[in-house]
Image: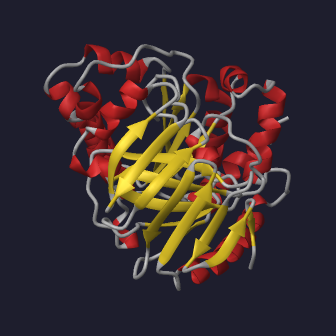
Amino acid sequence: MLHVDRFATLLCGYCVEVQSGMTVLVNGPVDAEPLFLELQAAILNRGAWPVLRPRFYAEGDGYLRSAEGEQLESPSAADLAALEKVDRIIDISSVSPHVSEPPSPGAVEKFAKSRGQVARLMRSRQYCITFWPTEYAAGRAGMSLQDLEEFVQSALFLHSETPADEWVRLREKQQSIANRLSEADELRIEADGTDLTLRVGGRTWINSDGKRNMPSGEVFTGPLEESANGVIRFSIAAALPRLAVPPIEGITLRFKDGVVEEASADSGEELLMRMLDTDAGARRLGEVGIGTNFGIDRAIGVTLFDEKIGGTVHLALGQSYPETGGTNTSLIHWDLICDLRPGGRLTADGTPLQENGQFLF
């Protein structure tokens, strides 16, 4: 059984550090009611004010199909005002059971622009994004609900009576990885269908330790914008958060001087091309990340987990994180994951750092 009380305590304490007098916004799917209620109690016990906003799964997809003009291009004044008045945000995600055909041309781009304004305001607050396991999400992952709950507990270290202590230990391990990578100039990623080089010299590596994502477990930076050359095949299906469409399978991208020049996919290629054509920055990289959470041992079709798998690397097309030194701008930030565990290798300036998904230092 999922330790929902530990889950709520971890989010309110370690992740967003709720303090007396604060206002805490909690967003999430309606069937995350047990976590909503535990969070409400935990927030109140800290002397803060909870604002609970459950949402329907088909809400975003329905909005995308019915909205027009300014409704697509900018968020409502009420949504912006609500974000401006809160001190902390906890955003609960899940897998939408409402899967539709790809949205109409132009809608994705406009919706991305609208979400970008919300995301920028959200990043100005202390926030954390997490996940609630459901029957539908379990079925999509080929698991029972009980197995998915156990998977979530393992990824979040909820089996420990003090999960926050486990996250502090992971932070320390990740810092040693970030320190080593900060010395590197050129990274080379090799795997089945993959041989890609990119440069990271002078960029800042971020230790993602569960403060913004729960679960987390990665170190990441922004590669030099014109440095990516070669080909990479993303062996893990690529989800599109906030859009109720099937994941895109088997994406292969060929880069030249930092720009995607060729792209293909085993399924969903039309939507892939639409994402790449969002704007000029959508064909450049905004992030390279290395997964370090070995409590996550398989992909479940949820980027929040899949990009953290120990033994994987992920590249994000689009917007860079300014704190890394990255300068690419785009309406999208789309994480794509390459599994290095079956025979892959990651090297830095010619020295192997990881083989078959295992760190060598």
Residue 58, placed above or below residue 109: above
Q: Identify the residue at horizontal 14%, vertical 28% (top origin).
A: 70
Using residue 11 as the reference point, say whether residue 53 is left or right of it.
left
Residue 94 shows in the view: yes
Q: How is the image coloured?
A: secondary structure
Q: Farthest residue to the left: give it.
A: 69
Q: Height in image: 97 above or below 179?
A: above
Q: Position of residue 210 (x, y in %)?
A: 61, 59
Image location (x, y in percent) of residue 171: 66, 71
130 lies above or below 353? above
- Classify residue 358 by image quadrant: bottom right
Q: Vertically, is 125 above or below 247?
A: below
In percent of width and height, residue 35 lies at 66, 36
- In the rendered image, the quadrant that contains the C terminus is bottom right
Q: Nearer the viewer, residue 168 or 272?
A: 272
Q: Compare residues 37 and 285 and report the one nearer the observer.
A: 285
338 sits left or right of 323 in the view: right
Judging depth in this view, the residue of 95 and 180 nearest the camera is 180
Quarter of the image with the N terminus is: top right
